[in-house]
Image (tube, grey):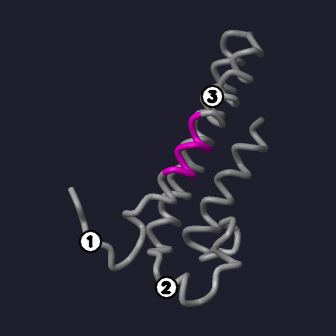
């Protein structure tokens, strides 16, 4: 499970700081005009934060499982990070606040 946490950290770094936006599903296949409508830096920040958060939950679960000698905690932490992280990532990265030139209606 630590390998998955490391993978999430690496992906977060590559997307945000390595500007590997092609790792974001759907962005790579958009026409250039469509890509210009999105604040990709903001979306990359969301990806980094969510990936780091998911990795943190997995690592904490790993160490708690080791301390308590209960391997089920590691699985609970992993699945909790997936169940919370993936929907949050999808909802937040597709929100209107990452579209450029949109009227703000708050």
Q: Identify whether 101 is placed above or below 5.
A: below
Q: Residues within 10 Å of mark 1 (few under 14, many from 20)?
A: few
Would residue 91 be found to the left or right of residue 76 on screen? left
Q: Identify whether 68 is placed above or below 53.
A: above
Q: Residues within 10 Å of mark 3 (few under 14, many from 20)?
A: some
For label 3, the SS is helix
Q: Which residue is mark 3?
A: 80
Q: Which residue is mark 1?
A: 103
Q: Identify which residue is drawn at 37% across, 63% down.
A: 97
Q: CA distance from mark 2 to mark 3?
A: 34 Å
Of the numbered discs 2 and 1, the one sitting upstream in the chain is 2
> Within the magenta stretch, is there residue 26?
no
Q: Identify whether 90 is placed above or below 3.
A: below
Task: Return the residue found at the far left.
Answer: 106
Q: CA distance from mark 2 to mark 1?
A: 16 Å
> Within the magenta stretch, is there residue 88?
yes
The image's mark for residue 36 is 2
| Main secondary structure type of the part rendered in magenta | helix
Q: Identify which residue is drawn at 63% across, 86% down.
A: 31
Q: Quadrant of residue 2?
A: top right
Marks 3 & 1, CB-CB < 8 Å contact:
no
Residue 35: image location, x then y, percent: 55, 82
Segment tinted magenta in the rendering: 84-91
Placement of the C terminus among the 4 image quadrants:
bottom left
For label 1, the SS is loop
């Amino acid at each position: 499970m630590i390998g998955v946490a490391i993978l999430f950290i690496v992906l977060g770094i590559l997307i945000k700081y390595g500007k590997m936006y092609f790792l974001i599903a759907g962005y790579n296949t958009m026409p250039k005009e469509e890509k210009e409508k999105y604040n990709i830096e903001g979306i990359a920040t969301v990806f980094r934060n969510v990936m780091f958060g998911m990795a943190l939950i997995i690592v904490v679960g790993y160490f708690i499982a080791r301390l308590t000698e209960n391997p089920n905690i590691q699985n609970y932490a992993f699945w909790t990070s997936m169940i919370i992280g993936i929907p949050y990532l999808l909802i937040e990265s597709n929100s209107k606040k990452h579209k450029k030139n949109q009227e703000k209606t708050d």
